[in-house]
């Protein structure tokens, strides 16, 4: 069974935006992740904005999201990759296996959030963190289920 990964370009305040300038370190990370892909998941209406699929299948969500994603994960052994739009990520909830977040050192104050108000709480387990020479921080996380909370002493 494959896994669903989400790659998103974010501002410090969590707004999903296009990448702007991509430095060499970001380019290397994106290329490394792209090589792991078996297929891409896309949202209807922005299907043509998928990064170069390199001949890999591109699946556009048209029906029940959870059902379609489960079927696609069962079909592929590698990664089903979503290069994110915030609106879809929130709807995926427990279907995402890994998050790859490229956080740019800028604050916009408004825009579409990767995790808008009302999403289910989610714990993430860090896999790696790298800072690029341009100040972009690349975080890789595995989904780790529901969070636990401690008490302030």
Image (cartoon, rainbow, N blue to C red):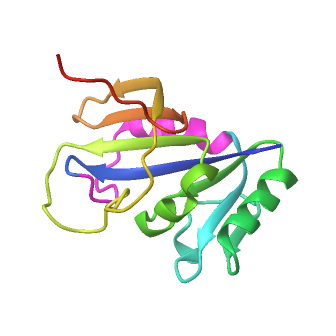
- Residue 129 or residue 88, whichever sits in front: 88
Image coords of residue 3 (percent x, y): 71, 44
User: At x 36% / y 52%, what residue is drawn?
Assistant: 9
Image coords of residue 69 (percent x, y): 72, 61
Image coords of residue 143 (percent x, y): 54, 37
- Residue positioned most to the right: 75
- Residue 10 or residue 21, whichever sits in front: 10
Q: Quadrant of the C terminus?
A: top left
Residue 39 placement, left or right of 101: right
Residue 8 vs 32, above or below: the answer is below
User: At x 77% / y 63%, what residue is drawn?
Assistant: 57
User: At x 86% / y 54%, what residue is drawn?
Assistant: 75
**What is the total number of numbered labels drawn onto the structure image?**
0
- Residue 4 or residue 70, whichever sits in front: 70
Residue 43 vs 39, above or below: the answer is below
Residue 117 placement, left or right of 6: left
Residue 24 visible somewhere in the drawing = yes
Which segment is the magenta one?
14-35
Image coords of residue 48 (percent x, y): 57, 76
């Amino acid at each position: 069974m494959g896994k669903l990964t989400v790659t998103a370009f974010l501002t410090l305040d969590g707004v999903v935006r296009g990448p702007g300038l991509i430095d060499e370190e970001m380019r290397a990370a994106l290329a490394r992740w792209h090589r792991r892909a078996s297929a891409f998941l896309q949202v209807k209406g922005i299907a043509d904005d998928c990064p170069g699929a390199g001949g890999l299948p591109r699946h556009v969500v048209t029906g029940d999201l959870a059902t379609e994603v489960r079927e696609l994960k069962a079909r592929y052994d590698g990664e089903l990759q979503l290069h994110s739009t915030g609106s879809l990520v929130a709807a995926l909830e427990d279907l995402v296996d890994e998050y790859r977040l490229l956080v740019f050192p800028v604050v916009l104050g408004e825009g579409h959030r990767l995790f808008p108000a009302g999403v289910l709480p989610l714990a993430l387990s860090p896999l790696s963190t790298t800072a690029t020479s341009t100040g972009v921080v690349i975080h890789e996380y595995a989904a780790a289920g529901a969070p636990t909370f401690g008490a302030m002493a």
